[in-house]
Image (tube, rainbow, N blue to C red):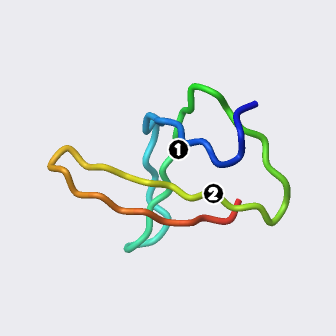
Amino acid sequence: MPASSSWQTGVVTAIGPETPHAKTFRLRLAEPRTHRAGQFYVVRLTAPDGYHAQRARRV
């Protein structure tokens, strides 16, 4: 398993609507990770036009 601070490139495999203003994105990682209750991940996104965003999500 990679170190907890390492970054991986993920591929979006599905996008599902949750509410009119929220969506769930499912990602495929080259090295899947396990998690514990209350743990969170930081996700960095880069759009094709170069836009960047970063969010922390509890899993």
Image coordinates of residue 55 in percent, x first then y, are: 48, 65
Q: In which quadrant of the rendered image does the C terminus lie? A: bottom right
Task: Please tell me the numbered disc located at residue 18.
Answer: none
Residue with the mark numbered 1: 26
Q: Residues within 10 Å of mark 1 (few under 14, many from 20)?
A: few
Going 70% across and 33% down the picture, which residue do you hit? 2
Residue sitting nearer the eye, 44 or 16: 44
Q: Quadrant of residue 41?
A: bottom right
Residue sitting nearer the eye, 32 or 5: 5
Q: Residues within 10 Å of mark 2 (few under 14, many from 20)?
A: few
Going 68% across and 65% down the picture, which residue do you hit? 58
Q: CA distance from mark 1 to mark 2?
A: 14 Å
Q: Nearer the viewer, mark 1 or mark 2?
A: 2
Residue sitting nearer the eye, 11 or 6: 6
Q: In which quadrant of the rendered image does the N terminus lie? A: top right
Q: Tag 2's secondary structure?
A: strand
Point out the residue furthest to the right here.
36
Image coordinates of residue 33 in percent, x first then y, are: 72, 38
Residue sitting nearer the eye, 14 or 35: 35
Image coordinates of residue 51 in percent, x first then y, are: 22, 57
Residue with the mark numbered 2: 41
Task: Name which residue type carries label 1.
Answer: Arg
Going 69% across and 61% down the picture, which residue do you hit? 40
Closer to the N terminus: mark 1 or mark 2? Answer: 1
Task: Name which residue type carries label 2.
Answer: Tyr
Whether 14 is drawn above or below 41: the answer is above
Tell me: 38 left or right of 49. right
Q: Tag 1's secondary structure?
A: strand
